[in-house]
Image (spheres, rainbow, N blue to C red):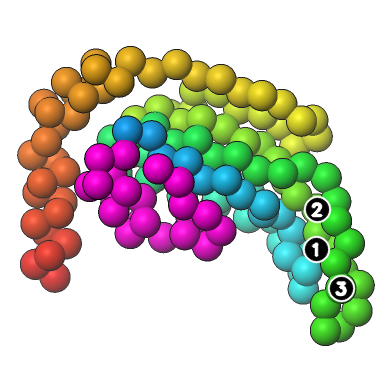
């Protein structure tokens, strides 16, 4: 299943998709420097959040992102955004399986044995169920 844009920053979208049976979470992204602060680089934060979605839900995450620059018009005039690329695929516990870089277009590939993942998930089902009950209690 796929979430877009700001959905990627919040755990609820990933949890909802996983509870609906998603076997892999996809987050297509266009993220980079902020128009109001070109020096702000949230790349590492973004990557850790995506890895957290994988680990929290025990499913792989595919996080794709643009590279390059774009000039946009804002209420304050022209602004440049630099997209930081670094697309990656994380395994079901959040480990990076494959990754691109910040300069080149790339196709990154990973292979997952979904049957084996389901068996491991069944063994850890208490973790997911306990987390679901916990979130409903508070």
Q: Is residue 48 left or right of residue 116?
A: right
- Circles 2 and 1, Cβ within 8 Å, touching? The answer is yes
Q: Is residue 64 above or below residue 100?
A: below
Q: Nearer the viewer, mark 2 or mark 3?
A: 3
The Cα–Cα distance between marks 2 and 3, rounded to whole angstroms, is: 14 Å
Secondary structure of the magenta portion, mostly? helix
Farthest bottom residue in view: 75
- Labelled pair 2, 3 in contact (Cβ < 8 Å): no
Which residue corresponds to mark 1? 38
Q: Give the spatial CA distance, label 2 vs label 1.
A: 8 Å
Disc 3 crowd, CA 10 A, few/some/many (<14, 14-19, 20+)? few
Residue at left offset 66%, top offset 37%: 86
| Mark 3 or 1, closer to the camera | 3
Tell me which label, 2 or 3, sits earlier in the chain: 3
> From which residue to which does the magenta span run?
1-22
- x, y percentage for residue 66? 72, 44
Name the image quarter holding residue 98.
top right
The answer to the question of whether label 3 and label 1 lie on touching residues, with beta carbons closer than 8 A, is no
Dividing the picture into quadrants, the one containing residue 65 is top right
Q: Let me know if residue 85 appears in the view.
A: yes
Residue in the picture at 11% in, 26% down: 123
Who comes first in sequence, dot 3 or dot 1? 1
Residue 51 appearing in the image: no
Would you call the spot at circle 2 few (<14 residues within 10 Å), some (14-19), or many (20 or more)?
A: many
Q: Residue at x 10, y 46 (%)?
A: 129
Q: Quadrant of the N terminus?
A: top left
Q: Residue 96: x, y in percent?
A: 49, 28
Disc 2 designates what residue?
82
The tag on residue 73 is: 3
- Label 2: which secondary element: strand
């Amino acid at each position: 299943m796929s979430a877009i844009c700001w959905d990627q920053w919040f755990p609820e979208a990933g949890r909802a998709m996983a509870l609906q049976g998603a076997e892999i979470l996809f987050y297509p992204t266009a993220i980079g420097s902020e128009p109001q602060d070109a020096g702000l680089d949230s790349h590492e934060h973004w990557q850790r959040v995506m890895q957290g979605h994988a680990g929290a839900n025990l499913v792989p995450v595919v996080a794709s992102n643009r590279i390059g620059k774009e000039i946009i018009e804002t209420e304050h005039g022209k602004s440049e955004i630099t997209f930081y690329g670094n697309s990656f695929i994380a395994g079901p516990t959040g480990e990076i399986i494959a990754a691109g870089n910040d300069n080149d277009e790339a196709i990154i590939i990973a292979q997952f044995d979904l049957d084996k993942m389901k068996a491991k998930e069944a063994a850890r089902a208490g973790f997911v169920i306990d987390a679901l009950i916990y979130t409903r209690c508070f």
